[in-house]
Amino acid sequence: MTGTGSRVKDTGSGGRITGAFGYGGRLAVIDCDLKASSNVEGIPIDDVSTVGGLDCATVRENVIVGTGGSLVSGIRTAGVTNSDVIRDNHISNTTFGIIVTAGTAGTSVDHKRSQLLGAGSGINTDNTGTDVEVSKNIVLGEGTAFTPTINGASGTSSKFSENYCDLATENCQECVASGFCDVPLAPFLFP
């Protein structure tokens, strides 16, 4: 994206984005380049081998499927505005689900109707140094190689609420003990 307010949106034609594109040493399927008001909405993104959505102000209602390779991220942001939103995305087969690395306060990671499946680190806000709100997320792992957790930055006023992980998987109990995840009312059961 090259302009403030740029938007990538599925208009219902059923198209998909596959693979990665890059410029200036940055490689991502969709790179918003820290543009204010950038919006990525309703896009199916397949075979992500780098980052599905990079440095966007709003990323919502997307389906992001990685290749399963190392260092694959569903969504990564360094903080674009004071009100960045990552909401209602489905992310699977990635090493990292969502990474919030730095930037301004006010980033919200909220998945009211969606979940992260098979993400090595579900949501990582360790390096922000700013306040992040992480709520209503479900983080599930696939196999013992995955460590589905929500990591928070220390020394900030970040808020974590109604986030759930599968207690049968690695690191979920640590996520609960740290106050980043809540204990689910019933175990996750799959056929």
Image: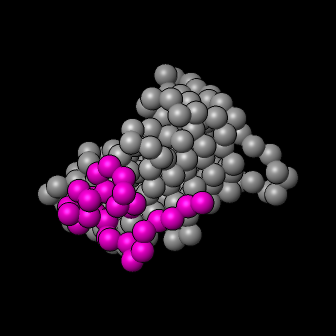
Lateral position of residue 108 relative to residue 47, left or right: left
The residue that appears at 60% across and 47% down in the rendered structure is 64
Residue 1, by quadrant, is top right
The residue that appears at 26% across and 64% down in the rendered structure is 176
Lateral position of residue 158 relative to residue 91, left or right: left
Q: Position of residue 66 (x, y in %)?
A: 57, 38
The residue nearer to you, when weighing 52 against 33, is 52
The residue nearer to you, when weighing 187 against 73, is 187
Task: Specify start and end residues of the magenta stretch as a single range.
Answer: 165-191
Please identify the dominant SS of the magenta region.
loop
Does the image show residue 36?
no
Q: Position of residue 88 (x, y in %)?
A: 56, 63
The quadrant of the image that shows the C terminus is bottom right
The residue nearer to you, when weighing 128 against 3, is 128
Q: Position of residue 190 (x, y in %)?
A: 55, 61
Residue situated furthest bottom in the rendering? 185
The reply to whether the magenta stretch includes residue 1 is no
Residue 109, by quadrant, is bottom left
